[in-house]
Every structure is written in C-alpha cells, then in structure tokens.
Image (cartoon, rainbow, N blue to C red):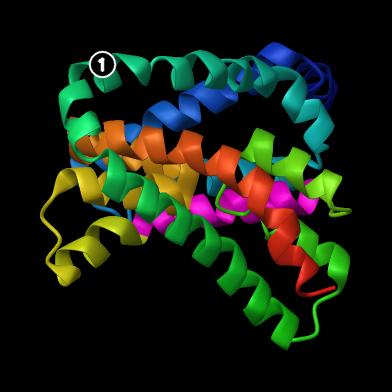
C-alpha cells in the first residue's frame, strides 16, 4: 500500500515542487543559524539533499523537473528584480564604469581561457572543451553558447552549477584574505566568476556587492557569447 502511494505521489509535479521549496527553506534556516557561513550555502545543501532523494527513490530528473520547473520559471523575474538595487546605486555604477568594463574583459577572457588551457593540457576532447568554455555564465545562456559551439548542454549545466557553488563558498574568505574591502569590487568579481549563485551570495553579504554582482553576471553573459568561440578556436 505504501509502495503504491509513493509511486502515485512521485509522478505528481506538486510533490517535487514541495520538496524543492521545503528543502531550500530548511537549508536557508541552517545557513542563517550558522551566521551565513560561506560553507553553509543553502543552494549547495539543497542540491546535495535533493540529489540524494532522487537517487534513493530512483526518480528520473525529467520527473523531478516537471515540478521544479515552477521554481525555474521564477529565475527570470528574480534577475529582473536586480534592477531595483541597481537603480538605488546608479550613481556609484556610473562612477565605476571604466574599471568595471576593464575588469569585465579581463575576467571573461581569464574565466574561459584558463579553464580551456588547463583542460586542453590534459587532452580533453573538443566537445568537452566547448562545454567548459561558458562555465562562468548563467545556466540558460551558457547552455545556448555551448550548443552553438558543438558542446554538450547538459554537461555545461553541471559545470555552471559546480562553478557557481565553488565561487559562492570561497568568495568571501578569498576576498578577506586578499584584503579587498570595496564591496563593489567584491560583488563584481563574484558575479563575473560565479554568475547567479555568486550573485545570490553577494546579496547576502551586502546590497552594493549584490548590485555589482548582478551587473557583472549580465554583462559577462553577453561578452562570453562573443568571446568564447574565438577563444575556443585557439584549441581546435
């Protein structure tokens, strides 16, 4: 009877929507209790727990996504909402426009070029290199860039999430060790290297950091779409 009930519930989209929301609320509560420690990242905790549940219940990702797609849809409005803190800090953005553009070009080239150089040194196939190039771009854009260059979009999605999680975990300790105190610079670096997940972490730390992270995330998506094919051509 219990088995039959689970079979029925596991195919219901609302079940996986509820699981996603509940798991994240619990993970965020743990992060709050830890004082927002970088290692207690709610996205990382949620990913680990949901993957464990899917594996334990032999649930296909496509089945899970039927429910999780409702949360996925909210990514668009969430990105648009970044315009609010951007407007609040518009004067500061204008004052830092030139160094931001310089950092954008340097960061985009380094993010794609360094990853490709290391992977190519280990003899990684070209389709995997194409999948790796846009790893620092938000997932929806990165998958499109990857597919256009002959990469594997699914692999790109995994690499993007991994990059974002690593960036969100190490960004605060790394910036502290480097003695970087300007939250605009800290946020811009986080958004440039770790896209949406890094931007979310930046907003937790400071609104100014989150604002500049959001700007970097958006601009890097555009610039990487232009530069990634050129950089990849050096490794063909």
Q: Which residue is mark 1?
A: 87
- Report the span colored magenta: 153-169
Q: What secondary structure is the magenta-colored segment mainly? A: helix
Q: Position of residue 183 (x, y in %)?
A: 17, 45
**Looking at the picture, does residue 188 appear above or below residue 112?**
above
Q: Is residue 161 magenta?
A: yes
Q: Is residue 9 visible?
A: yes
Q: Residue at x 61, y 48 (%)?
A: 224
Q: Residue furthest front?
A: 98
Is 198 or 88 nearer to us in this picture? 88
Q: Residue at x 74, y 86 (%)?
A: 122
The part of the image, by quadrant, that contains residue 2 is: top right
Q: In the image, is residue 41 above or below residue 59?
A: below
Q: Is residue 35 visible?
A: no
Image spot of residue 206 (x, y percent): 18, 36
Q: Which image quadrant is residue 18 in?
A: top right
Crowd band around label 1 with a 10 angstrom C-alpha radius: few (<14), some (14–19), many (20+): few
Total labels drawn: 1
- Of 10 and 38, the residue lying toward us: 38
């Amino acid at each position: 009877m219990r088995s039959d009930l689970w079979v029925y519930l596991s195919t219901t989209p609302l079940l996986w929507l509820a699981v996603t929301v509940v798991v994240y609320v619990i993970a965020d509560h743990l992060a709050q209790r830890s004082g927002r420690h970088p290692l207690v990242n709610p996205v990382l905790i949620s990913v680990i727990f949901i993957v464990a549940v899917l594996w334990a219940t032999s649930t296909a990702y496509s089945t899970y996504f039927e429910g999780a797609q409702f949360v996925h849809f909210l990514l668009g409005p969430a990105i648009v909402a970044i315009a609010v803190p951007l407007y609040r800090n518009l004067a500061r953005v204008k004052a830092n426009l030139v160094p931001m553009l310089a950092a954008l070009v340097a960061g985009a080239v380094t993010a794609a070029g360094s990853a490709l150089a290391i992977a190519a040194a280990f003899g990684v196939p070209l389709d995997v290199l194409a999948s790796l190039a846009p790893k620092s771009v938000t997932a929806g854009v990165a998958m499109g860039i990857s597919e256009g260059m002959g990469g594997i979009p699914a692999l790109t999605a995994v690499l993007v999430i991994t990059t974002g999680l690593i960036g969100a975990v190490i960004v605060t300790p790394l910036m502290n060790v480097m003695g970087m105190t300007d939250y605009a610079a800290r946020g811009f670096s986080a958004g440039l290297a770790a896209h949406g997940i890094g931007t979310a972490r930046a907003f937790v730390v400071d609104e100014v950091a989150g604002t500049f992270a959001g700007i970097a995330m958006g601009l890097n998506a555009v610039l990487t779409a232009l530069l990634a094919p050129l950089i990849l051509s050096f490794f063909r």
